[in-house]
Image (cartoon, grey):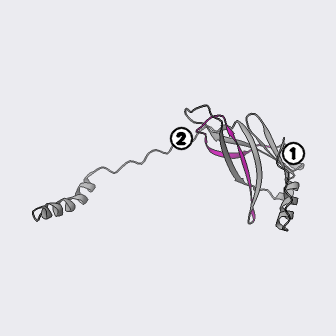
Amino acid sequence: MRPLRPLLALALAAVPLLAAAAPAPRLAAAPAACRAEPVYAVGTLNLVLRGPTVMLTATGLAASAGWHDAVLRPLPVTAADRAAGVAIYTLLACPPAFSAQVITPIAAARALHRPLASLRRIVVRARTNARSLDVARFLRHHRLASAGTTRRAAGPQPA
């Protein structure tokens, strides 16, 4: 067993030399930004209060498996919509290169950068439907829930 020790020591001493001579591993190229498309359908909308930040969350269905990187992208609103306190978003995701045709759940969240007091209704659109959330109803429910009552807010309505 003793003759193997000098050989092992020589091999361990050579590792740094071999590592320095080897080319540096190349990092995989970052994937190209996908061309996000509207998901198949919007299911639920919710507002989540996290300290001073209000998050809009949306769940929905993708038309097939493998959709990824879901986002809520704001859409331009008319002056009348803005005056009425309406914000409109589209639920988008990156489609897969190929996949099985299986309806698959998907979700996205986004911080709202508008004061809730200026919003009355939030609309989220998908390819086949849209849902809206009544902000005043949400705020009433949130105040009741924080006061300890068990009253539930109504869910989102079709837009």
- Tell me which residue sits at (25%, 60%) in the image: 16
Callout 2 secondary element: loop
| Residue 97 screen position, x and y as percent | 55, 33
Left or right: residue 7 versus residue 72 is left
Q: Which residue is mark 1?
A: 81
- Residue segment shown in magenta: 52-76
Left or right: residue 155 versus residue 38 is right
Tag 1 or tag 2, which sits nearer the N-term? 2
Give the quarter of the figure containing the C terminus: top right
Q: What amino acid does circle 1 point to? A: Asp
| Residue 72 screen position, x and y as percent | 70, 46
Give the quarter of the figure containing the N terminus: bottom left
Q: What amino acid does circle 2 point to? A: Ala
For the stretch drawn in magenta, the main secondary structure is strand
The one nearer the camera, 88 or 47, is 47
* Residue 117 picture quarter: bottom right
Vertical comparison of 145 with 46: above or below: below
Q: Which residue is mark 2?
A: 32
Vertical comparison of 38 with 113: above or below: above
